[in-house]
Amino acid sequence: MHKKYFLPRLYGVDYLRTTMPEYREITIYDIARELAISPATVSRALNNHPAVKKATRKKIQDLARQLGYRSNTFASNLRKKNTHTIGVIVPRLSSYFMSTVIAGMEQVARAEGYNLIISQSSESMIKEADNVDTMFNSRVDGLLVSLSYETDTLAHFEPFFKKGIPLIFFDRIREHKQCMGIVIDNQKAAYDATKHLLDNGYRRIMHIGGNPISHVYAERVKGYKKALGDYKIPVDPKLVLTRNMSEQAGVDAAEHILKMKPRPDAVFSANDACAIYCMLTLKKAGLRIPEDIAFAGFNNDPMSKVVEPGLTTIDYPGYAMGEAAATQLINQLTGISVMQATNIIILRSELIIRGSSAKKKRKS
Amino acid sequence: MHKKYFLPRLYGVDYLRTTMPEYREITIYDIARELAISPATVSRALNNHPAVKKATRKKIQDLARQLGYRSNTFASNLRKKNTHTIGVIVPRLSSYFMSTVIAGMEQVARAEGYNLIISQSSESMIKEADNVDTMFNSRVDGLLVSLSYETDTLAHFEPFFKKGIPLIFFDRIREHKQCMGIVIDNQKAAYDATKHLLDNGYRRIMHIGGNPISHVYAERVKGYKKALGDYKIPVDPKLVLTRNMSEQAGVDAAEHILKMKPRPDAVFSANDACAIYCMLTLKKAGLRIPEDIAFAGFNNDPMSKVVEPGLTTIDYPGYAMGEAAATQLINQLTGISVMQATNIIILRSELIIRGSSAKKKRKS
DNA sequence: TTTGAAAATGCAACCGATTGCATAAAAAAT
DNA sequence: ATTTTTTATGCAATCGGTTGCATTTTCAAA
């Protein structure tokens, strides 16, 4: 649509392409000619079709190997109408968690002969919709999506639903009858983290969470509240902050905490970055961790292991999530598994206890 | 090559594909029929070919839009023999730096209408070769590569060189007459970091570096040595460690340091992870940073900002590197820039000074 | 040896866009 | 009004596999 033409007089001349010393690709026709058989048989042999005699098949495959034959994906896709390509849309590529997820997907996809096309929404719904569009146009066989922060509708995925192209959400999911979701049990994880703080003697626990239109954050608040409930502690709205979970948000939260009259004695943050920056800011202000205020985060980011004290957090199985998502999608594509009615896969997460939440000393 | 067949009696039945409520794609033929013109003209109009009358073109494009026409990439690629796809091979996706690089590439590629296919070599040359192969078979238009730790030959890239498919190395590069490399000036950056330590009064500076068959690490040692040279300090081989730069390597290095009789008074590590784990281990052993031993790292990993004290390091422009690599490649593909003889692009990096290298107090 | 079913192979029509060349239409020159 | 040039369009071949159906080959049963 937006090609440039600066052709002087002749049309068809391909000025833009560097001409190379003609390097003809081997096609099935070459093999067919060589063996004096039909291209159809060659095609079938190369695809291990059972209707080809073993001997013929071997002869063909051997020659193919010898000649360095490479199947032309385009011809094949054109005819078969599938691409062996999986689209991945994530809010942001440059995070430890996300890159781990993608590493897992890549692993599985490659092993199964699929390619990954990756794009990022930069947490913008507009961009997300744009990416979805591109993926649709690229005719991906399936889509793996972690929703942007802003996304509050799935309308832009309609083309996929309509066409029945498999779509799987992971991590930042939204429920939809036509697609599977892969998550950890955020509620339980948050519950565990909160309960751990409670068990260790903390009572005024603040929660810093993200926008609850996101499933992930909504569940985490729930878990937090549930744990408090189990301890018969009423939820104090002043102790529940909703922020964008950035580093800056952590700093801001710290400043907010410093101004509170009865300060919380612990903070459970819905991610590590926010927890860490909050913690460090408070530390700088003279508070001791965990004596004055304990901390728990979420994600097990590499950072959480190197701050002092180490941050208690939830280990979030990124690699496994990527593997699971890709595996499920490929199973759907190959018909091994068909979509069930409600289909959410929950991965095991784990509470990692570090110094930031050590048992509270007496008092309280 | 490895498809499964469990067909009972009939061959051609497509058991594997979920049948959907027939959703015919619009093709140029549909448009042509509708407007009673030839498909050739439609094709040209959609590509903004100048030989189509403005009015006709508009009519065609409008109808295309209205019908929701989507160009079939496979047909197009099959005919045109190019894919608008860029292959990316990296040692490891799950690092902050690498994901940042890829974010940069993705940005540029998408804007220019290219797709990215990404794969990881897991630092293994075998896997790298395997990935190169897959990329070749996928007929990527070009390749962006950061070499694995093990890679000591470029033989597996031969098919690309032979066929004249543009190949650009970034970060972990090796020189080759046929391809461009994009790096930071590792030597200068290392020089700057070392000089900074020297300027601040440190004299027995240890260097922890990676395998010097890698350009990156070789340059960093050079910079380190050069800075010492400028200060007329002889290089003490006992102070130059070669490790695999993992977290564990940092811990090991720390244990090594603790056993040394005249201990170094500063460490310049070729990456942050190693520096940080070394630093923390020493800290645990009772050494004070930077009073007893100062530190400088390399990469400006998010971790370096949250350890205490903050780690002095080199800011490594991942995003910019990704953008640059993708831009260069696309320019080569579109013929805007042709490969020069020797072509290395050097990106600006920056020394970030934090607490781990504060000026040495008197003495020495 | 004949016959019939099963197993292999071939034929030819796709898939949808691109493009060299020929031709038709429009504009300019004579 | 006629010829020449320029500009638009169409024709038809091509890209390389895939696959329904027809045809041939093989091989065991009669």
Image (spheres, coloured by chain):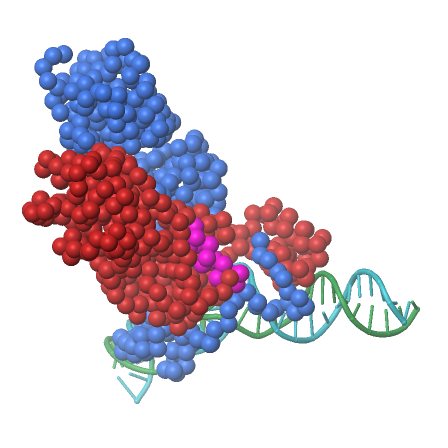
Chain colours: A red, B blue, C green, D cyan
Q: Nearer the viewer, residue A242 or D10?
A: A242
**Magenta-span inclusion, residue B21:** no
- Give the vertical position of A301 relative to A13 (above or below): above
Image x and y of residue A329, in percent: 45, 59
State the residue in front, A4 or B312.
B312
* Quadrant showing the C terminus of chain B: top left
> Residue A258, percent across and down?
9, 44
Q: Which residues are magenta?
A: A323-336
Q: Nearer the viewer, residue D18 or A180?
A: A180
- Identify the residue at the far top of this view: B261
Residue at x 44% of width, y 68% of height: A341
Residue A299 visible, this angle = no
Any part of residue A151 in sight: yes
Between residue B274 and residue B283, name the one nearer to us: B283
- Classify residue B354 by image quadrant: top left
- Is B15 situated left or right of C30 in this image? right
**Main secondary structure along the magenta-highlighted residues:** helix
Residue at 34% across / 35% down in the picture? B172
From this view, report whether residue A3 is shown above or below residue A272: below
Q: At 28% across and 37% down in the image, what residue appears?
A: A354
Give the tally of numbered discs.
0
Instruction: Residue at 31% x, 61% y: name it.
Output: A131
Q: Is residue B29 above or below residue B172?
A: below
Q: Is residue C16 left or right of residue A281?
A: right
Q: Is residue A325 magenta?
A: yes
